Image (cartoon, rainbow, N blue to C red):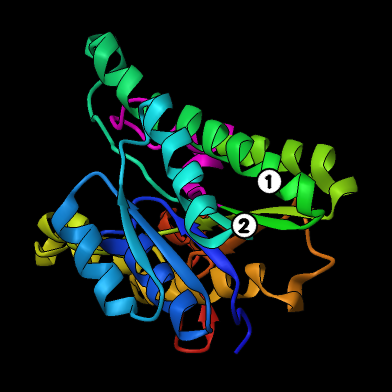
Amino acid sequence: MRLKDKVAVVTGAGRGIGRDIALAYAREGAHVVVNDVDPATAAATASEAGGRSRAIVSDMGKSADIHRLIDETVAAFGRVDILVNNAMKIMPGKLEALPEESWDITMNIGLKGAFLASQAAAKHMIAQQSGCIVNIASIAGLHPYNWAGAYSVVKAGLIMLTKLQAMEWGPYNIRANAITPGYIRTPGTEGMYGDPVIYEGRRKGVPMGRVGDGEDIAGPAVFLASDEARYTSGSVLGADGAQAVGYFLSVPGRRFSGGSVE
């Protein structure tokens, strides 16, 4: 077991990518604190994780809730070894018409919340001289994702926050890394991927020829939290089927066919 007896906090873990990471950590021996704003999904994931795992309901857009999450974790387990900043809420819309409130919701949960959770956890990690932060960013932090409000801005900021954490907290043996998922099919995106036209169009844009799932992100998240990655910090690990480098697949012309390039 690569995470035996480690204490891991996973935000937004009631479903989707967060849930898959929480369950993967539990399988690797971690005691997982499952955070979500929804009590039912948080409890369900914690129950499935088993062991000493527990659910802590809190809103990652609220400072008091974030500090309570970390405080309750330390009170229950005596330490915090791993923090996964995964919670996010997309408020879509065109920039020229996006309400200020929509911008703030996405920013507060996805970026400010990640900063505050990391800061609260880092105080304990600094004291114990060890810790690991895994930030779930996106290829939308590398390339703009239109009509998604503040989403791309948040994910780009999360990538830079990762690098800053690695630099400032490295002397305390705290590692910070980011994962940039590409197209991932989860319960939250099923309304889109359930449309066969959208699914097929997106699948064709991925060099590996498929849309990913939560397990495709959970694997890298386990690696980054484990001792196998003990000298890996400040990195941005793509988990996108080569989507981020597959731009020219969508450009007309130059298709290989019948032994020649068209």
Q: Is residue 163 above or below residue 229?
A: above
Whether residues under marks 2 and 1 lie with C-beta atoms below 8 angstroms apart, the answer is yes
Kindly tell me whether residue 208 is visible in this rendering: no
Residue identifier under label 2? 79
Residue 106 lies in quadrant: top left
Q: Position of residue 98 (x, y in %)?
A: 25, 15
Residues drawn in magenta: 135-157
Residue 108 lies in quadrant: top left
Identify which amino acid the numbered label 2 is placed on.
Answer: Arg
The outermost residue toward the right is 171
Side of 12 relative to 41 (left or right)? right
Residue 124: assigned label: 1
**How busy is the neighbourhood of tag 1: few (under 14 within 10 Å), some, or many (20 plus)?**
some
Kindly tell me whether residue 53 is visible in this rendering: yes
Front residue of 178/24: it is 24
**What SS does tag 1 mark?**
helix
Identify which amino acid the numbered label 1 is placed on.
Answer: His
**How busy is the neighbourhood of tag 2: few (under 14 within 10 Å), some, or many (20 plus)?**
many
Residue at image location 44% in from the left, 47% down from the top: 72
Q: Position of residue 176 (x, y in %)?
A: 70, 51
